[in-house]
Amino acid sequence: MRGLTPPVLPFRAMSATSEAPAAYRNTADDPGAIGLIREAIADVRSRRRLVRYLVAADMHKRGADTLLGNLWWVIDPLLQMVVYVVLVTLISRGQNIEHYPLFIFAAILPWKWFSASVTDATTSVTSQDRLIKQIQFPKIVLPVAATSAGVVGFAFGLIPLAAIILISLGSFSPFLLFLPVIAAVQFLFTLAFALFMAAGNVFFRDLGNVSRHLLRLWFYLSPALYSLAVLDEVRLLDQFPILRVLLQLNPFAILFEAYRAVIWGVPGDISPRLPDLSGLGLLAVGSLVFLAVATVVFKRLEPKFAKVL
Amino acid sequence: MTASDAPQPAAPSARDAAMEAAPPPMLARSGAPVIVAEDLGVRYDLRFTRKTTLRGSLGQILGRGQSAGFWALQHVSLRLQHGESLAVIGPNGAGKSTLLQVLAGIIRPSQGSVDVHGHVSGLLTLGAGFDQELSGRDNILLGGAFLGLDDAVTRRIMPSIIEYAELGEFIDAPIKTYSSGMRARLGFAIATSIDPDILLLDEVLATGDAAFRAKSKQRVIEIVKAAKAVVLVTHDMGWVTEYCNRALLIERGRVIMEGDPAEVVAVHQEHMEADRMQRIAAAEAAGVDPRIVRAR
């Protein structure tokens, strides 16, 4: 029985019957980092319909039990903006930045996308434990779907954004065309982060608890409610210049400033303009590297999921 | 039993629906090996047990150098030919389900390899992937996508799934409003909607009320007969001798015996009986009422 090799059959990744492989080899071997990334891309490509269904199911569920249904996609960021405007107005005793609602909204919208994606992705694998132990499917589709669902929420949020722009500035600037570019960079970063959290939470359930607080801290450390220029007034940073560098390297410092540049402008000159393209480019390259590392880590841990869950 | 080349049963079936579009299945030749497993081993790392927290895990990493682990399966080699039906039997915790999970590609072996030629499917435990908020119809689509069925195929077999599960107009209501019987029927209908080349079956499922149980058992038998190869894990020795032409006895992760179902079942029952007597003796020695042991 041993020693005989099976006849070599052509490997067909997909047949008309199924998106699952028609033949496979399950071994202890590791295909290496490049092989894993290639596998991950093939996984998502062959299962893009599953991703679509998971996203649609997510959309459907969010609106299902509420009176206003999917209108909440629009109302939610608006309400959050109102809360921050009231809060900051009270603290600063009315010494507000001009068009402050627009100023804040330009940061709240991308942040809601990021935090919702990361929160959902963190539990995306662990919540499907029963399925994972029973059928073989590429687990990477779960965090990818969670991240993609966030994109839809972001797209809905562009509606109130357009309204606030019209109310505050009166017209749309051509620089708004940079929004998809900035969003694409954010998507790369978000996806990488989501993959890490999804895989990590399988092994350490603490991550879900910790992430909520870390996300909140991250938000306040990022120039969302204030502009990066405010940091010049913070004395502590003069003593420790390294802190300033760290705050400026924060991906969301780059992203928020970029969003704000094309939507609102810069402090002292409120008119939309070109974002800092070199910073964005650097972040894009960094995010790609981060995504590659996250993919390899996820794929390496994936075979252990069914054992641990 | 051997896999029959008889026409497919009339129950909901993905293969029927895909037949026109699909090229001829690659397993047309009889006697070709469909599963070849060489020296399989699966090792569980006990450091990460269910719901680990960072604190517990760090403690173990720092506390003890070597990680606790055990081999759930070791040195298992098997070869399944087209047309064969293999029963895997053994006591609880022997590694039977782990073996199925490795064959299905759900778990990666820590040692050795498995080569599988053909579409593999197990029968999902009823409603494993159900989303409570979604309607029955959406759950069928989602379930099909998880199983890797083509969208067109899923949509084509949808009416027969709905009819088979006896759901009627409830199909458009969220699953959370279903009775447990309705849920079980839908889960069974989705799980059995695909006709795999290789069927991996962990315990024969029968579900719902008496009438549906008879119907579902009939359906499982149909799938077993239609599949080109079957691996069946069960405690029901009647199934082993009736529907399998080969049996594998596993104890503590190792293959004890392989061969004719009736012979392997006899050895298994002998071992079980010996084990039971041993436990009764141990209980008596420890002063425990042996009836407690016997009741198990």
Image: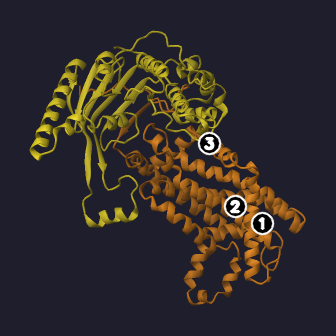
Chain colours: A orange, B yellow
Helix, strand or loop at mark 1: helix
Q: Chain ID for label 3?
A: B
Whether pointer 1 and pointer 2 mark residues with C-beta atoms closer than 8 Å, the reply is yes
Q: Is residue A90 visible?
A: yes
User: Closer to the observer: label 2 or label 3?
Assistant: 3
Q: Chain ID for label 2?
A: A
Above or below, A175 relative to B181? below
Q: Which mark is residue A262?
A: 1
Q: Is residue A274 visible?
A: no
Q: Which mark is residue A182?
A: 2
Three-letter residue code for mark 1: Val
Residue located at (27% from left, 26% from top): A4
When asked about the image quadrant of residue B228, the answer is top left
Whether pointer 2 and pointer 3 mark residues with C-beta atoms closer than 8 Å, the reply is no
Three-letter residue code for mark 2: Ile
Q: Which residue is mark 3?
A: B133
When asked about the image quadrant of residue B246, the answer is top left
Helix, strand or loop at mark 3: loop
- For the residues labelled 2 and 3, the Cα–Cα distance comes to 34 Å
User: Closer to the observer: label 1 or label 3?
Assistant: 3
> Outermost residue toward the right?
A170
- For the residues labelled 1 and 3, the Cα–Cα distance comes to 39 Å
Where in the figure is residue B290, as x and y percent of width and height?
A: 16, 38
